[in-house]
Image (tube, rainbow, N blue to C red):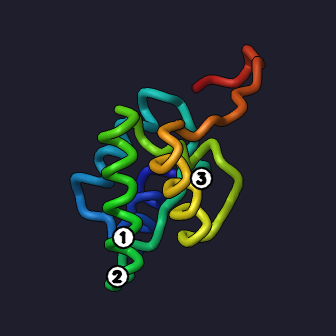
Amino acid sequence: MTEAEFRKLAEKAGYDEEEIQGFIKFHEESGIPFEEMPLLDHNVDDKAADSLDNKVKKYVEMFHENVPVFMMPPMTAEELEAVIDECLRSGKPIEVDVPDDPSIHY
């Protein structure tokens, strides 16, 4: 996927320019392909979206790292919110298995 194609998808999902630039910078620094970067639909304007955003912010504040969504299995926003809730409750961040494969560039 090209940067232009990714940008179009991100704009359609409701991401603003600053967020899109963050994805592009992350892509350049990590080498992770655009097609492997999850885009949650930001066009949802309800309490659930606000709740998830707030929980992600609390997660970042507590653990000083982003929620590793791109390293997790696919799930709904509700499932992700439940995982974050458990982390905030237990005080333990999300653990993901990182393959010990030198051919994978993170």
First in sequence, mark 1 or 3: give its number: 3
Per the image, label 2 sits on a secondary structure element best described as: helix
Q: Is residue 26 above or below residue 78?
A: above
Badge 2 crowding class, 10 Å Cα cut-off, few under 14, some 14 to 19, many 20 or more, is few
Q: Amino acid at mark 3?
A: Glu
Image location (x, y in percent) of residue 32: 56, 37
> What residue sits 38% from the left and 82% below the top?
44
Q: Quadrant of the C terminus?
A: top right
Q: Is residue 42 above or below residue 4?
A: below
Image location (x, y in percent) of residue 83: 58, 56
Q: Amino acid at mark 1?
A: Ser
Res 1 seen here: no
Q: Which residue is mark 3?
A: 35
> What residue sits 66% from the left and 36% below the top?
96
> What residue sits 38% from the left and 74% below the top?
49
Q: Which residue is mark 2?
A: 47
Left or right of 19? Residue 38 is: right
Query: Gap between marks 1 and 3, in whole Å?
Result: 26 Å
Asked whether the residues under the numbered discs 2 and 1 touch, taking CB atoms below 8 Å apart as contact, a structural biologist would say yes
Image location (x, y in percent) of residue 8: 41, 67
Per the image, label 3 sits on a secondary structure element best described as: helix
**As drawn, which residue projects farthest toward the bottom?**
46
Q: Which residue is mark 1?
A: 51
